[in-house]
Amino acid sequence: MANFHYRAIDAQGKPAEGEMTALDLSQLEQRLQDMGLWLVRALEAKPKTSSPIGKRGKVKPRDLLEFSTHMFTLLDAGIPLSQAVSNLAKESPNLQLRSTLHAVFQQVEAGSPLAAAMKQHPNVFPPQITNLIQAGEESDTLADTFKELERYLDWAEQIRGDVRQATIYPSIVIFAVTGLLILLFTFVIPRFIPVLHDLHVPLPFVTVLVIGVSEFMVHNWMLWMPILLMTPLAWWVGRSYVTGFSSWRDRIILQLPVVGELLRMLTLSKFVQNFAVLYRAGIPVLQCLELCRGLVGNRVVSDALQNVQRSIAEGSTIHESLQRYPIFPPMMIQMISVGETTGNLPKTLMNVANYYNREIPRRVKKIFGILEPVITLGLIGIVGIVALALFMPMMSLMGGIK
């Protein structure tokens, strides 16, 4: 598709100018003739692209969810596709999405399929969405596809909430505890050290230990402070630029006690849910796996899926390929095997996804039910040890006076 600036004349010889999207000059000329115009001159222009700067804002998953809901409602009511896109291009509250849908509408009006028009804007419409819509167009079930897409995006929003709850809260707590420890050992305890030395009493081991840690942090802050500050940056640089770092990091994350198992379940839930949605839409298995690799959010699982994809291409079944990798649990493999045998793989995959969707919230509640009192007791223990280290020499002195 290309944009053309054209100059034309009507039957009375009056000039007309404008801009129109068409596959080529022949289609442009035909469309103008249908409008009662004869092409005089046409120049191809650069297509207008949407920009996320200014007040447009980024297109969020919630915006795509509302778009899918409205498209299903309009198409199910019998409104033509181009008119439905045009309506949403005028009414979308997100300016970037509105601009993008206007460009999509122009391409659809020019005869382009909806999926092909949306693929011109990958920063707004990710591949899994455009592939689903393409499958819906090819099977003439576009309205049902948007309903399926609505369910998928709603599920993805819930998963993002579970991930935030599973990771953000512990991260905030770790940050707060680290700040508390730095405050105690660099500002609070150093003010007590001269007082403790002036008591001239033998210091207990715990007091000597606390004083030693405090003096190390005060006199060597140029050593530990850069390490503390540079660790997040090194983590990001390693993930982005160091080959093999992402696989190592994700492998370590999956091996963490308690939290690692939860994150493993979240990753597998993303895999089976996306696989089920894509496969049920009629997308070939190998293409489903290729798309799922970019959606699971874990390099270990992504690399395993790449090998599974290669095995299936060589003739292996899905469950035979999956069972070679311990990251995939036996329950999932057994259910997929049953689905392949009975020819009802999409339903089986959805059953696995529903199991994880029920189990993950329960697991999150269980983890936080244990984590919160553990963190509270840990904070009490840290403050208690420091307080004990500071007051034991004073109590010893008072006992000597008596």
Image (spheres, rainbow, N blue to C red):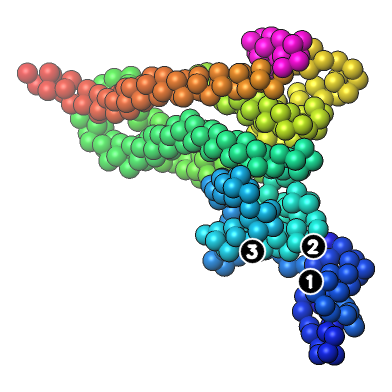
Q: Nearer the viewer, residue 356 or 278?
A: 278
Earlier in the chain: of badge 2 and badge 1, it is 1
Circle 2 is placed at which residue position? 110
Q: Nearer the viewer, mark 3 or mark 2?
A: 2
Q: Residue at x 88, y 69 (%)?
A: 30
The quarter of the rendered structure image containing the N terminus is bottom right
Q: Amino acid at mark 1?
A: Met
- Residue 251 in the image, given as x and y percentages of width and height: 66, 24
Q: Mark 3 against mark 1, which lies toward the viewer?
A: 1
**Disc number for residue 20:** 1
Which amino acid type is shown beneath numbered disc 3?
A: Ser
Where is residue 89? Give x, y as percent.
61, 61
Mark 3–mark 2 distance (CA, rounded to whole Å): 17 Å
Q: Nearer the viewer, residue 199 or 375?
A: 375
Query: Label 1's element?
Result: strand
Task: Check disc 2 and give the amino acid type.
Answer: Ala
Q: Is residue 397 left or right of residue 179?
A: left
Q: Is residue 60 magenta?
A: no
Q: Which residue occupies 71% across, 10% down?
A: 338
Q: Point out the tag, 3 or 1, that comes first from the N-terminus.
A: 1
Distance in Å between CA atoms under marks 2 and 1: 8 Å
Q: Secondary structure at mark 3?
A: helix
Judge whether residue 131 can be spotted in this image: no
User: Which span of residues is magenta-colored?
Assistant: 324-344
Query: Going 59% across and 58% down the picture, which residue do you hit?
Result: 88
The overriding secondary structure of the stretch rendered in magenta is helix
- What kind of element bears circle 2? loop
Query: Residue 99 shows which numbered tag?
Result: 3
